Amino acid sequence: MNNDIVEPFPDSQISDAFRAHADSGLPYEISESELRILQDSSIGPQHPAYRHLPPFLSMHDAYRRLISRHQGEESSPNWQAARRRYVHAMSAPYGSLDLPIKMFNDLDTLIFHGDLKHRVNMRWETCRRAGLCRPYETLLGITMAPTSWSIPRIRIRINIDVDWRKVPRSQLIGTVVHEMLHAYFYVHCGVAGHRDLVMGGRMDEGHGVYFYAAGRQLERRWRLTLFDPWDPTGLC
Ligand SMILES: [Zn+2]
């Protein structure tokens, strides 16, 4: 019960060590100030960079919004530039752990209509914590809803304890997009984003009909792995 008022995943030294900076690691076109906004866990409603949530939609309307494509949006210079960076990053043989952080805004532009920018805090984190429902080394990522007392923005944590050298880049970035999809439903549906339609099988309330339908389409379009082929429930 006390767990409810203790901040889950407060920033650790390990998380700080894996912080992405514009002038180090893999060169990627994103500013240090954008990286700071993305990785700063303390930004809340009083901060100038904080972006309020839009009026809520139903799960169905949020899903329709996600999969609908607009010619104007996709022909814009910003979208095209993000796509060029995406194609390059996904085809280059090298990579680094700062890549997923640096790609966040581009993934948001390309896939989520820019709805997540400044509304999400993302970092690498060690998930060796008691109380997780599964062994820490099989958890790839986790998304947490904002709370009024300790989590000012939607929070995504990618698990640094996983040996990502053994995981294809399409699954590393797919894991980020999987977590961003949870964040997207939080942005548009609030807690209802965790009340998806469950139709049995491996579905749960966070991974129901709308989540799977959207996720499968994103996998095909962007050639990513959002659902672990060996353990479809391995992502949170
Ligand atoms: Zn999930």
Image: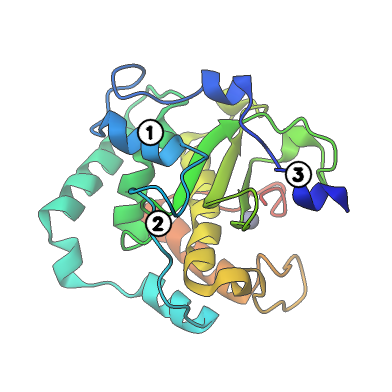
Distance CA(mark 3)–CA(mark 2): 25 Å
Nearest-to-viewer mark from 3 and 2? 3
Question: Where on the image, by quarter, is ligand 1?
Answer: bottom right
Nearest-to-viewer mark from 3 and 1? 3
Q: Disc 3, disc 2: CB below 8 Å?
A: no
* Residue 36 marker: 1
Distance CA(mark 3)–CA(mark 1): 24 Å
Position above or below: 188 against 229? below
Mark yes or no: residue 90 visible.
no
Where's residue 62, x and y in %?
45, 76
Give the camera-side residue of 206 and 86. Answer: 206
Horizontal relation, residue 127 to residue 33: left or right: right
Q: Residue at x 60, y 51 (%)?
A: 143
CB of mark 1 near ligand 1 (< 8 Å): no
Type of residue at label 3? Val
* Residue 6 marker: 3
CB of mark 3 near ligand 1 (< 8 Å): no
Nearest-to-viewer mark from 2 and 1? 1
- Dot 3 falls on a residue whose secondary structure is loop
Where's residue 111, x and y in %?
35, 59
* Residue 116 marker: 2
Where's residue 165, x and y in %?
56, 23
Position above or below: 2 against 20? below
